[in-house]
Image (spheres, grey):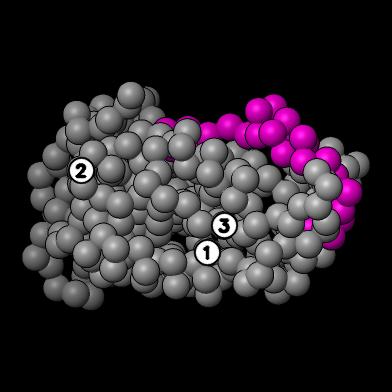
Amino acid sequence: MKLVIAAKKSDNLSTAIERILTDANGAFGDIVSLGGENWECKERSIEDDAWQDLAEDVYIQLNACAAEFAFVPDENRKKKLLISDMDSTIIGQECIDELADFAGKKDEVSEITERAMRGELDFDGALTTRVAMLKGLSTDVLQQCFEQRITLNDDARTLVRTMSENGARCVLVSGGFTFFTERVAKLAGFHHHRANTLLIENNALTGEVGRPILGREAKLIALNEEAAIADATSADALAIGDGANDLAMIEAAGLGIAYRAKKVVSEQADMAIKGPSLIPALFFQGYKESEFVTD
């Protein structure tokens, strides 16, 4: 097991982390730099009970710092498949909320989105309800929304491009809409994308979504299918997302990461990224800063 720490450049933070590790009474071996203010260190052979106490203490102290960190296994760290949610994960927005703004219904739709992402509402029903509120919206608005509202989250392209250049298959899987996943996938460098389809008639949204709806279980199916395409298993996958509909794939993946996620997701994922940068997902896999693909 290794402890990986990804921190913003700060002398005070570096000093605090050094003190935390020193105070751990030899629980960790030599610190190895991953570049910048990012490190990893291997746990030493300590009795299980003692290690558990030390790990919990280190966790509490690091959690109070402005650093991303995780305890990760030594084996099978660099994954062969990246399967990622789109809205509020790869991009900083919820596309359906932004579309609703053009229809003058953002507040109402956003409230439903938030509850669905917290797991308080059935995803399929919540999506159907929200899409119905978009009925009659001109299809011209879709491109306007993409161009004017949608932005990649910090280092999303670096995450995707680095894993891709190292042989991983990268797939965007979203409970949102193919109009956006197609464009975001291209922008960020994904190999493939999966999402729901907005039904259109006479250049306007009908207020309906194509069936079957891509929700929580469909994301798990996508993980397994895409792993097979990558000649891999779910253990070889990194799944990342923020909402309750991402939980099945996050729990099934060898490395499940909650990114700026709802509490229900953060509590069940292998590790969490507080954000905004997605770079820690690379450090957790053992990538060094010198290996990043930033073009």
Q: Gap between marks 2 and 3, in whole Å? A: 25 Å
* Amino acid at circle 3: Ala
Q: Which residues are magenta?
A: 131-156
Q: Residue at x 63, y 52 (%)?
A: 177
Amino acid type assigned to the residue bearing label 1 in the image:
Asp
The residue that label 3 is drawn on is 195
Residue at image position (36%, 41%) is 160
| 161 displayed left or right of 210 | left
Foreground disc of the pair 2, 3: 3
Contact between labelled residues 1 and 2, with CB atoms less than 8 Å apart: no
Tell me the quarter of the picture where residue 163 sits. Answer: top left
Q: Quadrant of residue 104?
A: top right
- The x, y position of residue 250, in whole percent, is 43, 65
* Residue 105 visible in image: yes
Q: Residues within 10 Å of mark 3 (few under 14, many from 20)?
A: many
> Is label 1 in contact with label 3 (beta carbons under 8 Å)?
no
The numbered mark, 1 or 3, whose residue comes first in the sequence reads 3
- Circle on res. 11: none
Which of the 4 quarters of the picture holds residue 141? top right
Residue at the (55%, 46%) spot, across then down: 181
Q: Which residue is mark 2?
A: 166
The Cα–Cα distance between marks 2 and 1, rounded to whole angstroms, is 25 Å
* Residue 102 included in the magenta stretch of the image: no
Residue 158 in percent (x, y) is at 36, 34
Q: Kindly check if marks 2 and 3 are in contact, taking CB atoms under 8 A apart as contact.
A: no
The CA distance from mark 1 to mark 3 is 13 Å
Question: Which mark identifies residue 246?
Answer: 1
